[in-house]
Image (spheres, coloured by chain):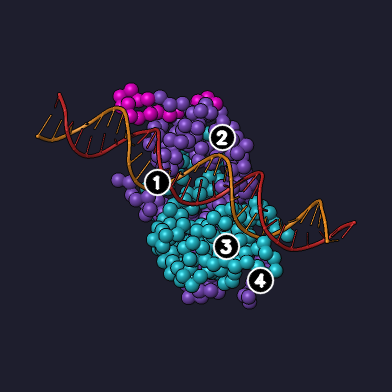
Chain colours: A purple, B cyan, C orange, D red
DNA sequence: AGCAAGTGTTTTACTTGTAAAGCATGCGGG
DNA sequence: CCCGCATGCTTTACAAGTAAAACACTTGCT
C-alpha cells in the first residue's frame, strides 16, 4: 500500500504503526499522531502487565495485590484502608476485598484504632514482608531485561518524557490536590 | 530528603517519582531505574483509559467495545470472531460476549460463512459505522489536548522510543509470528 | 464411506472489579 | 445532651473478563 515502507532500518515494526496506517487510509483527514503515543502506551502496558504477572503468579499474587503489599512495604509503616486506596489508586471496595484475602493468607494484619473505632490500621506480617522482598528483585531483574533493547540514553529520555506526560496527566486528570 | 530536589524547573513531580524514592530508601541496593519507565507507562495507561473512557461512555461504549468496532472500521471489511480476537488482543470468549451485546444494540451484524459453517463473518451496520466515525474525532481531539503539554519534538521522540520498546515487547512476548 | 483429529466459536463456572447503599462511629451546633 | 451530618469502611448487586470444557463442523486418512 505505502510507497515508503522501507526495510528493517533498525526500528522494528510494531502493531500500533500498522493500526495507525489503517486508520489513516480510512480517514486521511484525521490527525492520528496522538495514537502513536497513546496507543503505544496502552499496548505496552497491556503486554508488560501480562508479562510481569508471571513472576507474581509464581508467588500466587495478582498485580493489584502486590501493589497493596508494596505500598505497605515502601512506606515502612501501617496504613489505613483509605490510605491504601490512595496509594494503590483503587476503589475502597476493592481494597476491602484484597485485605480480606491477604489477611486470610497471613500476609497482612489489621488492628483497630484506639481513638477512632471506625478506622483500621493494616501492616505487613513477617511473611508478607519477606514475600515482597523476595519478589521485588525478580521483578526488577525482569524489567531490566525487558528494557535492555533500548540504548541507555534512550531509557533516560523515555523516563523523562513519560515523567513529563504523567505530571501533565496527574495535574489535569487527578485534579490538583489542594 | 534529597539534596538535589530543586525547584519547579519545568518538570512537575509525578507520583511514580515519589514511589521510586520510597523504594530506594527501603532497598538502597536495588536498581529501581526500570520503575521509572515501566511504572510510568502503567500509570499513564491507567489515567488515560480512565479519561478516554469519558468520550466513549457518552456513546454508551466501553473501550474494549470501541476497539472491536474500530477494528472493523479500520480494516474496512468483515472479520471473523477469531480475527477480531487477534486485532483486539482479547480472548475469544470476551469477543463472543461483546459481539452478542453489540449485535443486540444493532451496531454489528453477523452472517455465516457459506463454505465453512463454523465460521461467522461480522461487519458494522450503518449505525455502527456512524458511531465510530462520530466518536473517533472526539477522541483524537481529546488525546491531542492531553499531549499538548509536550513539546512537538518531545512528542516525536516519545512516539519513537515507545515504538522501539513496543517492537521489543511484541517480538519478545508476543513471540515471533512465523 | 466413516472415523479420528483439528479448528472456529460458544458456554460454563468462577474471579475480580465497581457503584451505590448500608453501618458504625465521630463531631459540632443548638 | 442529642440530633444531623460527615467520615471510614464494608456489603450488595451486578458487570465483565478468563480458563477450560463443550459444541459444531471440517478435513484427511484408510
Q: Residue sitting at 67 percent across and 69 percent down?
A: B114
- Give the distance between the C-alpha atoms of the residues marked 4 and 1, in whole angstroms: 45 Å
Label at residue B6: 1
Q: Which residue is mark 2?
A: B29
Please provide the residue range marked out in magenta. Answer: A112-127
Instruction: First in sequence, mark 2 or 1: give its number.
Output: 1
Q: Residue sitting at 66 percent across and 71 percent down?
A: A6
Q: Nearer the viewer, mark 4 or mark 3?
A: 3
**Residues marked 3 and 1 touching at CB (< 8 Å):** no
Label at residue B101: none
- Crowding around mark 4 (Cα neighbors within 10 Å: few <14, some 14 to 19, many 20+) is few
Instruction: First in sequence, mark 4 or 3: give its number.
Output: 4
Q: Residue sitting at 41 percent across and 42 percent down?
A: A91
- Give the distance between the C-alpha atoms of the residues marked 4 and 2, in whole angstroms: 44 Å
Q: Residue sitting at 46 percent across and 36 percent down?
A: A97
Q: Which residue is mark 3?
A: A16
- Crowding around mark 2 (Cα neighbors within 10 Å: few <14, some 14 to 19, many 20+) is few
- Residue A28 screen position, x and y as percent: 51, 75
- Name above or below for residue D8 compared with residue B69: above
- Crowding around mark 1 (Cα neighbors within 10 Å: few <14, some 14 to 19, many 20+) is few
- Residue B175 screen position, x and y as percent: 68, 54
Q: Nearer the viewer, residue A50 or B11?
A: A50
Q: Secondary structure at mark 4?
A: loop
Amino acid at each position: 500500500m505505502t510507497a515508503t515502507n522501507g526495510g528493517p532500518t533498525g526500528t522494528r515494526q510494531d502493531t500500533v504503526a500498522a493500526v495507525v496506517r489503517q486508520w489513516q487510509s480510512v480517514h486521511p483527514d484525521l490527525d492520528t499522531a496522538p495514537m502513536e503515543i497513546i496507543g503505544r502506551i496502552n499496548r505496552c502496558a497491556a503486554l508488560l502487565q501480562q508479562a510481569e504477572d508471571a513472576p507474581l503468579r509464581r508467588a500466587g499474587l495478582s498485580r493489584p495485590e502486590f501493589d497493596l503489599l508494596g505500598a505497605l512495604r515502601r512506606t515502612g509503616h501501617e496504613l489505613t484502608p483509605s490510605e491504601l486506596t490512595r496509594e494503590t489508586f483503587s476503589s475502597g471496595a476493592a481494597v476491602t476485598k484484597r485485605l480480606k484475602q491477604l489477611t486470610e493468607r497471613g500476609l497482612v494484619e489489621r488492628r483497630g484504632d484506639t481513638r477512632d473505632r471506625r478506622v483500621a490500621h493494616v501492616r505487613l506480617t513477617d511473611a508478607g514482608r519477606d514475600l515482597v522482598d523476595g519478589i521485588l528483585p525478580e521483578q526488577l531483574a525482569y524489567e531490566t531485561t525487558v528494557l535492555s533493547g533500548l540504548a541507555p540514553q534512550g531509557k533516560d529520555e523515555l523516563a523523562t518524557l513519560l515523567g513529563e506526560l504523567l505530571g501533565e496527566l496527574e495535574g489535569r486528570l487527578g485534579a490538583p490536590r489542594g
